[in-house]
Amino acid sequence: MPISAPDAIEPAFRHAKEQLARPFRFAQWIRLAFVGLLAGEMGFSGGCNFNYPLNAPHTSHPVSHAFLDGDFPWQLPSHGALFAGLIAAFIVVGIGLLVLFTYISSVMRFILFDSIVARECHIRAGWTRRKEPGFRLFVWRLLFMLAILAALLIVVGIPVGGAWAQGWFRHPRDHVLELVLGGLVLFLIFLGLLVLVGVINVMTKDFVVPQMALENVGVMEGWRRLWLWIKSEKGGYGGYIGIKIVLAIGATIALLVATLIALFALVIMIGIVVVAALLVGKAAGWTWNPYTIALAVVLGCAALAILIFAAALIAVPVIVFFPAYSIYFFAPRYSPLASLLWPEPAAPVAPG
């Protein structure tokens, strides 16, 4: 019989404890951290950038003479064509990375599902086995992103364009009430669209991915079935979303505290190494030039990757718990998952 959303919490906790601690296997912990990070189960993102005040006078900082005497074009914005080309290259590379990581995340979502059900994480074998459904999920995610962008252009772009055509932004003091009310309405619409997108994403990874993994159906067929189940049990699925929001808030607070404590110690260690490297470089007469800047950016990105993966290691209990929570809630409502999670004992063989 289907269980309620609160009733699925206890078996999910028990499952996470048994998978992670009975017995404790650090190699499995690392694999789950890697898979959960790439599958987007943490909701964590990071970037690597290098900022320097381009408009600062060159003579205002004595340190600049020591570190910025290379040939690097700090006045790059003055070269219009080169600057536009770099911006276009960054946009193309950014879109390419977004598409690449969307594909990796789609396949990793199936690997994470298999890891929770089987209580074993095997990345290479899972990648080989789940590339086809992962690609279907990847295509659906790309189309969903385009639909979100189109909705934003319609919901936000058209009203803003109309306000611009009416001259509200050229004379804002004459249209304060219209701008305030219009901005409030647009904010509420944007917030509602954001909530809708979040619910669709949660429902897809929690209830459509298991159907794709176990019956090899498409995303739209999985959603067609799920919509029928939701209409027949609105309270159950609504309670699931509400309980999951509460659990996510609590897990985020606990995870944030633990991560900040661990990362603080790790940042101190990395900072000591960085200071030592700067002192050695200064003693060796190094200056800031394109090569040393590129080296600093690479090392900074490596340090950032270490920090992100350390956060993923700390988040492994959360990475395991939330997929287990969705599985134990959905299994009594979806017989293929129930038979996989609770297989029937084999019939006894008669003697002789």
Image (spheres, grey):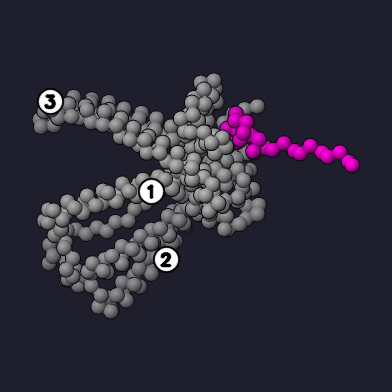
The amino acid type found where label 3 is placed reads Gln
The amino acid type found where label 1 is placed reads Leu
Q: Is residue 162 left or right of residue 6?
A: left
Residue 195: horizontal and vertical position, in percent? 39, 31
Disc 1/disc 3 C-alpha distance (Å): 41 Å
Residue that numbered label 2 is attached to? 269
Residue that numbered label 3 is attached to? 166
Residue 311: horizontal and vertical position, in percent? 46, 53
Residue that numbered label 1 is attached to? 100
Query: Magenta region: which residues?
Result: 325-352
Disc 2/disc 3 C-alpha distance (Å): 57 Å
Q: How many marks?
A: 3
Residue 212 shows in this picture: yes
Callout 3 secondary element? loop
Q: Is residue 114 left or right of residue 203?
A: right
Residue at position x 16%, y 68% in the image:
71
Callout 1 secondary element? helix
Snapshot quadrant of residue 152: top left
Q: Is residue 295 magenta?
A: no
Please tell me whether mark 2 or mark 1 is closer to you in this view. Answer: 1
